[in-house]
Image (cartoon, rainbow, N blue to C red):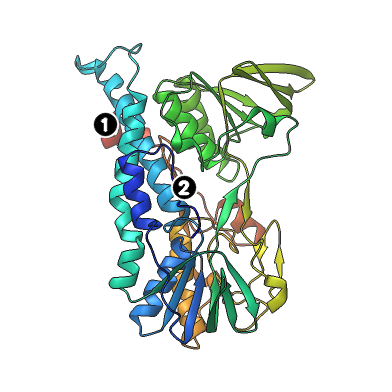
Amino acid sequence: MPDPIHVLPRDAHNEALVANVHPSDWRNPTPAGRYNLVVIGAGTAGLITSLVASSLGARVALVERHLMGGDCLNVGCVPSKSVIRAARRVHEARLARELGLGVSPDLLPDFGAAMERMRNIRARISHDDSAARYSSEFGVDVFFGNARFAGPGTVDVDGTALAFKKAVIATGARATAPPIEGLAEAGYLTNETVFALTERPKRLAVIGAGPIGCELAQAFSRLGSHVSLLESAPQILTREDPDAAAIVQNVLVREGVALVLGAAIRKVERKGGEKVLHFMRGERLEELVVDEILVGAGRAPNVDGLGLESVGVDYDLRRGVNVDDRLRTTNRRIYAAGDVCMDWKFTHAADAAAKIVVQNALFLGRKKLSSLVMPWCTYTDPEVAHVGLYEHEAQARGIALDTYQVPIAKANRAVTDGEE
């Protein structure tokens, strides 16, 4: 048997998590003949594909090599929003000084308690994505192991052959780091490891001012870390409208996050227990000394080791599996959904794509990914959200538009809530 999986820190909450999403005593079932659908990957896309297909009468096998629930449960939505909420409570407590109820701005919250609360919440939610639930309630055959296409209609899971009529690749993506000299040797955190922290980093550098970087920079700052946010572009949140990004940028600065925009990081080195970032800002070489580095820039699709070449599935190491608008790969029997093939790397996007895959793969549907109107939100405070096209995207398509802006400060409710 393979070694049991552990999630750090090894406490009761994480043991409960693992017991749900990769139980050490799990025994893979005997394959039930030829499956209507074999799904590789038990993140959001894989889970929803399996659940919907099974509920409609399909015989489904679901394969996961690590933790069911994928990024969203384990290292994404659930832990990040738990930490963000804890940080917001701290911030609200400080603002309550206006009412005579606030805490001293010099009083630091219990970082360990905030992180334990996150682990508790994650463990409680993990039953929803558990192997036992998918097996007993939904009738899905759950296999743990490494999946690889072994022939035109076969997936091999550590020596066990699963025959399929159709298959779905839902292996997601992983965090990557930019090729900065010395970064790997100095050590760094990503969203996949930062939630294992139990002690507050006194000084934290965040590389990348996209959604992950901005959300966690603000949260850690509110929880008491001195945060420096480094970004190569001249603004944060470069995928958002500049005026919306500017509002968040001003808030981060007001709350004490040190913004380093236009930064070109040359190298990182470790000096004792400290880490030193060397970067160019304009023509000037500068240094930043921190205790921890969090990389919030870059994702890579999980396409390695799947044997995609053997079944004629075209893919790119950066963009992932190539699919058409109906999420079918270059092999007509194999589909893909979620972060492994889509530009929208959101849980709700993976959920919607999974339902498209089931209709098209099993019921001769003609549903298109392009038919979706996608909302998304960055969970800074204030949040930045939009639905559909941005102004610049509409203009690029030649769509005539009018723009109407209402500052939130013009809303009396915002003023009464102190949110103007």
Disc 2 versus disc 1: nearer the observer? 1
Question: Residue placed at 46% from the left, 56% from the top?
Answer: 70
Q: Secondary structure at mark 1?
A: loop
Residue 404's mark? 2
Locate residue 389: give its quadrant: bottom right
Question: Where in the figure is residue 107, as x and y percent of width and height?
Answer: 32, 13
Q: Residue at x 68, y 74 (%)?
A: 313
| Spot occupied by residue 273 in the image (x, y as percentages of width and height) | 59, 17
Task: Judge the density around disc 1: few (<14), some (14-19), many (≥20) Cα neighbours within 10 Å.
Answer: few
Residue type marked 2: Tyr
Which label number is shown at residue 311? Answer: none
Which residue matches tag 1?
A: 417
The C terminus - image quarter: top left
Q: Residue at x 44, y 37 (%)?
A: 195
Q: Is residue 329 left or right of residue 368?
A: right
Other residues around mark 2 within 10 Å, as few (<14) / some (14–19) / many (≥20): few
Q: Residue at x 56, y 35 (%)?
A: 189
